[in-house]
Amino acid sequence: MNRTRASPNGPLRTSRPRGRRLLPTSLLALALIATACAPSGPPGAPAGGAPSVTPAPPAATTSAGPATSAAPTRAPSGAPSPAPARTPLATPDLSRVGFSLAGWKTDFSKHSVPLEEITSGGPPRDGIPPLDHPTFESVSQVDAWLAPREPVVFVQVRDQARAYPLQILVWHEIVNDVLGDVPVAITYCPLCNSAIAFDRRLGERVLDFGTSGNLRNSDLVMWDRQTESWWQQLTGEAIVGELTGARLQPLPALVVPWSEFRARFPQGQVLSRNTGYRRDYGRNPYLGYDELTRSPFLFAGTPDGRLPPMERVVALHLGGEDVAYPFSALSARHVVADRVGGEPIVVLYQPGTLSPLDSGAIAQGRDVGAAAVYRPRVQGRSLTFAWQQEAFVDAETGSRWDLFGQAVAGPLAGQRLEPVVHGTYFWFAWAAFKPQTRVWTP
């Protein structure tokens, strides 16, 4: 296992097991620090002297209009369970923590996890800058810089659908946005491959999020500007500070290829590369990170040995049960019907989505596919799905369905399945936070 730790005030240290070729993590971290902290400049300009691999983006414009299909605005009951009661932790010895305290107004006396589990990732607070004033382009403008199979995060609230390209999120990790009049945070941690959308409202308060520069279990630790509490991205839970124990409401979010979003939502909006920052959008700064034989970066735990650490899984929590579905199994079956927490669900897998963490140019990454989870019931009728002729087909009516859970042909055309909140993660990351997870096997 790769044992790498970035000291907030010193050099990176890396120890590697013999006989295994691993990612040069120290060089990676230095490159990320340099590019993440680069000064603002023309959007799309090369960062850190790296050559641009995509053409300059067109000017940002407003979409011609919102998407016409509605989606549920509430998070289905697949949302994470409330934070469990925790035994109060001892007053921390802040002289021994692995992150910088400089400039923070955070109440470190309040925390739900040992502070020793949090470590510096290298960049300072907001050194990987979140996008607070995102601009968007119409679907027709984006083909100039976004390849058909490149991954985007699809989020829809009410009748407004947007796509957030991972070629942008890999450099910013957080977008503070308002979608369908709901304040949302679109987040992505490249080290865990976790793309998660949250409702930014907590009671009567609306929170704005940034990157703390710290990690726990290799996962992004966010911070809110209102209280400077620290939040675990993968769980949506505040783990340090005034709001410790609070949880954000997750929203359905789906990683899909750009071509699928473009076809399904021709009036949708796409996050623009005109961000106000100089980044080499389209280039992957985590070259080869998701190879199955790699070790996780800055992960001090022992990976759960039931699957390779970097195996992609679709994972969810429903009815008190956590379940993970390996992509290696899904790619052979395409459809998995299961019961989670006593509820029937269906997992749909479709090839054709590129990895953002493989090749130096994201548009040249390998095909890893995409998956989605739904409740297989429409108009009070249970449906059984199969993969036939490159499409999802229900046995009851012969209707054809897409990855967005919508019937596109047949008697049920226009109907939509209810999404179950889920995510696609590297196995090591999900298992670190959900060790009791059941791993689905054929």
Image (cartoon, helix red, strand yellow):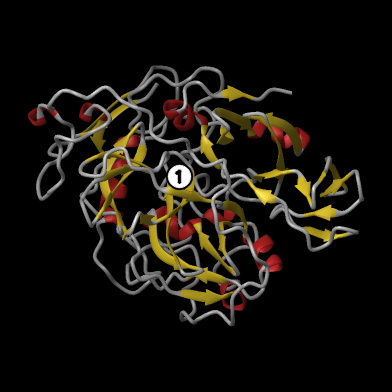
Tell me how many marks there are: 1
* Residue 162 percent coordinates (x, y): 55, 66
Q: Quadrant of the N terminus?
A: top left
Instruction: Tell me the residue that label 1 is attached to.
Output: 287
Query: Pointer 1: residues within 10 angstroms few (<14), some, or many (20+)?
Result: some
Judged left or right of residue 379, residue 321 is left
Residue at x-position 52% and y-position 44%: 358
* Residue 429 percent coordinates (x, y): 45, 32
Q: Is residue 351 above or below residue 61?
A: above
* Residue 118 percent coordinates (x, y): 25, 33
Q: Is residue 396 above or below residue 63?
A: above
Viewer-closest of 242 and 68 = 242
Judged left or right of residue 279, residue 250 is right
Q: Is residue 134 above or below residue 103?
A: below
Residue at x-position 36% and y-position 35%: 218
Regarding mark 1 in the picture, which secondary structure is present there? loop
Residue at x-position 41% and y-position 73%: 274
Q: Quadrant of residue 321?
A: top right
Viewer-closest of 197 and 283 = 197
* Residue 111 percent coordinates (x, y): 22, 34
Q: Quadrant of residue 44?
A: bottom left
Judged left or right of residue 149, residue 186 is left
**Amino acid at the residue labelled 1:** Leu
Residue at x-position 51% and y-position 69%: 180
Q: Is residue 259 above or below residue 327?
A: below
Q: Quadrant of the C terminus?
A: top right
Viewer-closest of 283 and 303 = 303
